Image (tube, rainbow, N blue to C red):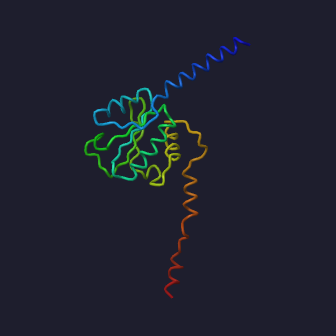
Amino acid sequence: DDSILETYRARRLAEMQAQASKERFGSLIHINEQDFVKEVAEGSSDCWVVCHLFVFSKPACKLLNQIFVQLADKFKAIKFVRIVGQEAIHNYPEVACPTVLVYYENTMIRQLVRIDTLGGLSTTPDVVEWILSELGVLQTSLEDDPRKTQRMVNLTRGKPRRTAHEDADDDW
């Protein structure tokens, strides 16, 4: 019994140490132009990198920065970085921000341009987590796509639309 417990304990300890070595990030890291290649493209050789190209003054970018702070704390094995869009890519149009670049093994896997691709200004950390899980970046504990719930709420909150026939009746 003691040898079985000791074997189990050693195996579990090795698993925990392996997990801890992967979970080395835990925050949204601000990088600059000089760090972009090293931290994003080359930095993705042994982990997923989610890079947020942003503009300081845009509400959508501020929202996404807050979401990435939360997700970085939750998924410490993923490197979350942010960089001003024009520092990452010279002459990158501000209208395209926020843009999310997803890298793995020194390759850009996906590019998500503008907040609309993530659910607009009503997006939540759960929505972004779900989208990243669909891309294979992370394992989520969410059971259903949170955008389905948002759509249902939006449908029930909205005023009923009037038909053209009902509008014509108002003229009389």
| 89 lies left or right of 101 | left
Q: Is residue 49 above or below residue 19?
A: below
Q: Which quadrant of the figure contains the N terminus? A: top right
Q: Position of residue 10 (x, y in %)?
A: 61, 16
Q: Which residue sits at x=57%, y=59%?
A: 153
- Which quadrant of the figure has residue 104? top left
**Residue 23 screen position, x and y as percent:** 49, 29
Q: State the image coordinates of residue 144 (x, y, percent, origin top left).
A: 60, 46
Compared with 157, 135 (above or below) is above
Nearer to us in this view, 163 or 119: 119
What residue is rendered at 53% in x and 46% in y?
126
Q: Residue at 40% across / 30% down in the picture?
A: 44
Residue 27 lies in what quarter of the image?
Answer: top left
Farthest-out residue, bottom: 172
Residue farthest along the top direction in this orientation: 3
Q: Residue at x 30, y 39 (%)?
A: 88
Q: Nearer the viewer, residue 25 or 163?
A: 25
Q: Position of residue 117 (x, y in %)?
A: 44, 50
The answer to whether residue 29 is above or below residue 166 is above
Can you say whether 74 is above or below 3 in the image? below
The count of marks equals: 0
Q: Residue furthest right?
A: 1
